[in-house]
């Protein structure tokens, strides 16, 4: 049961990430500072997701 809850949480995170990527891909970037901020935020989010994934794996039986 715990594994199902974790799988559903990861699926929701992945779906949200895909929606964000799709929305970002539709916009034309004309502001290099905005693009740099977006790129930095994306790297930070990827790092946090890796940390969450590692935490979930460490808690799995």
Image (tube, helix red, strand yellow):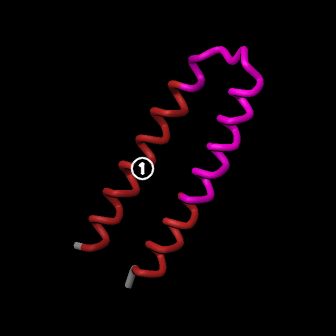
Q: Quadrant of the N terminus?
A: bottom left
Image coordinates of residue 28 in percent, x first then y, are: 65, 14
Span shown in magenta: 24-48
Q: Locate residue 13, reporting x and y percent.
A: 42, 50
User: On the picture, is 29 further left or further right than 14?
Assistant: right
Left or right, 1 with respect to 54, comes to: left
For the C terminus, the image quarter is bottom left
Residue 36 place in picture, x, y as percent: 74, 34
Graded by Cα atoms within 10 Å as few (under 14), some (14 to 19) or many (20 or more), the crowding at tag 1 reads: few
Question: Looking at the image, which residue is at 56% across and 59% down?
Answer: 48
- Total numbered labels placed on residues in the image: 1
Q: Nearer the viewer, residue 22 or 36?
A: 36
Which residue is painted at 63% across and 43% down in the image? 41
Q: Is residue 6 above or below residue 8?
A: below
Q: Is residue 55 above or below residue 24?
A: below
Q: Residue furthest left?
A: 1
Q: Quadrant of residue 7?
A: bottom left
On screen, residue 16 above or below 49: above
Helix, strand or loop at label 1? It is helix
Q: Magenta span: helix, strand or loop, mainly? A: helix
Magenta includes 31? yes
What residue lies at 57% left-to-right and 62% top-to-bottom? 50
Residue 42 lies in magenta, yes or no?
yes
| Residue at 36%, 48% in the rendered image | 12
For label 1, the residue is 13
Q: Nearer the viewer, residue 28 or 41?
A: 41
């Amino acid at each position: 049961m715990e594994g199902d809850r974790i799988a559903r949480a990861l699926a929701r995170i992945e779906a949200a990430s895909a929606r964000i990527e799709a929305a970002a891909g539709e916009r034309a970037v004309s502001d290099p500072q905005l693009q740099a901020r977006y790129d930095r935020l994306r790297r930070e989010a990827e790092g946090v997701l890796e940390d969450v994934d590692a935490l979930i794996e460490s808690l799995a039986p």
